Amino acid sequence: MKVITCEIAWHNKEPVYSVDFQHGTDGRINRLASAGVDTAVRIWKTEKGPDGKAIVEFLSSLTRHTKAVNVVRFSPSGEILASGGDDAVILLWKLNDNKEPEQCILQDDDDTLLNKENWTVVKSLRGHIEDVYDICWTADGNNLVSGSVDNTAIMWDVNKGQKLSIFNEHKSYVQGVTWDPLGQYITTLSSDRVMRVYSTQTRRVAFNVSKMSSGQGNAEGETKTYRMFHDDSMRSFFRRPSFTPDGLFLITPAGCVESGENIMNTTYIFSRKNLKRPLAHLPCPGKATLAVRCCPVFFELRKTKEDTSPQHSFLSSLPYRLVFAVASEDSIFLYDTQQSFPFSYISGIHYHTLSDLSWSADGSFLAVSSTDGYCSFITFEKDELGIPLKEKPVFTSVTPTTAEKKLKKAQTSRVASPVPRTVDGSPTNKNLDVNSPSTPLQSKASSNIIGTKETPSTPLNSRVSPLNLSPEEKKPVQSGSSSAKGPQPRRITLNTLQSWGTKPSTPAPRRISLIPVKTDVPVSSLSTECSIPTLPHSEAHEEHSSEDPASKTPEAKRPRTDESNASCNSNNQNN
């Protein structure tokens, strides 16, 4: 293991806030992205020199942000680079091989270099109203989550460029976010001293972690509780947590443990099975921790010298070994899952507070950024960290389901039973007797209408003359049998009055089901006390006598005979 701090004006000697290695390029090139106060994002090429130390070469400068850039993160495939800054915008960059190189000013002394690569913005994600502090991608690269000074975290759909959900439960800055590699949880860490774990399915808070019992009661038997995380007095802007690559553990910085009057800085480890209470904590004797990054390589279990059996720590009995780095304000700790104490400790390499960490795809580089304007590299020889597994374990991830539109299915064959109401253009039907036992009811409502788009509704008056329908015609038409013949007719239940030529002493009127059907036979004579508007595209069907099959509909209020005319006049006088 070797450490080198490259004497390069990374961002015009301004503070460097974030670094990230590109993965998914099959180790062909170790690209490193850096972000700083100078509003630029820069791409670098990292190689290992003959002495085992890192050699850095400038590739490109990405200038689109208008304020300081706080975080850069490559997508898992390495094709997209996301950057977020104080301008509250998240920019998605992609390498463009067709564009010609441009000149870039790297330092204040007007030294210019030619961009060897050209990256262009493919999308801009706007939703935050304050500085963006942290970003994390999903395992498939289709979504990301961002944390901001506006006290919110936003879950994004990268392909559509839209917000999926806004988490606004925090009371202060959201300084760190991480997305579960298995896709089930999103974790946010804020300066309000609360860690919140959200479910990506329900998009609600699953766990709130802020306090823990000390385990020691006072004289009265009461158990004392203490806050698990530091307040906003931390010197760092960031609290960047991380899940292990297998998603089994969540590692969170900025922890503190009260021991009497003393407060000890620590890093918490949560098990996926219980995210309410930490499984363990890793004490930091110096300053508070601020960032955690896990090596993407899975290693074989380390064996002891006494025997050939692998060691196991209290963390778990995993069939493999994972390595992760924890950065405090002034030092770096290297841990693995087989022991509870660090196997490496690096300190005194920067003058100011550290800001971020990043591992290369093969685990041979660990980049460290600092607010003093410089970056350092910790390089490892082959198999120095361990022997990589021949086959990387495969894990099943859950992608967040986007909100589906609720489609209303058209009810074509379902009978609707509306509540009786006054038809527009006709008087209220006061003669309607719902309780009449002789009234055939098709439903609980007093009228049952089967409508289709081909047969529009027509205003009807409530009084019509009776029709002498045969029993076969009184049967309701089945929708299944009539669908092949033509459009479904409208079924209307109406009250009937006296027929033409009947005496006034006839029994009380009864209600029948009138089923209008389009036929070629002319309709017989009808007479009503009130006029009946003609139904469009349909006519009243009536059984005609064999003597007069071609009888026509009489004109309105026209008497058939003198005798019937006298009867009608007498009825009108009575009314």
Image: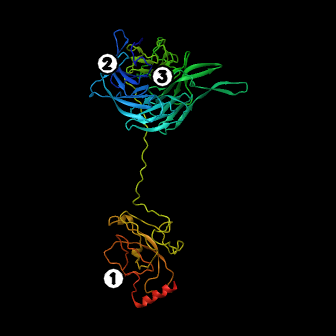
Task: Identify the residue at the far bottom of this view.
Answer: 563
User: At which x and y percent is residue 89?
Assistant: 42, 32
Residue 487 picture quarter: bottom left
The CA span between labels 2 and 3 is 34 Å
The CA span between labels 3 and 1 is 95 Å
Task: Identify the residue at the far right of this view.
Answer: 220
Q: Amino acid at mark 1?
A: Ser
Residue 394 in sight in this render: yes
Badge 1 element: loop
The residue labelled by disc 2 is: 113
The residue labelled by disc 3 is: 292
Badge 3 element: strand
| Image position of 388 with respect to 274: above or below | above
User: At which x and y percent is residue 337?
Assistant: 48, 20
Badge 2 element: strand
Q: Amino acid at mark 3?
A: Val
User: At which x and y percent is residue 49?
Assistant: 34, 11
Q: Are marks 2 and 3 in contact (CB under 8 Å)?
A: no
The CA span between labels 2 and 1 is 101 Å
Residue 464 picture quarter: bottom left
The residue labelled by disc 1 is: 551
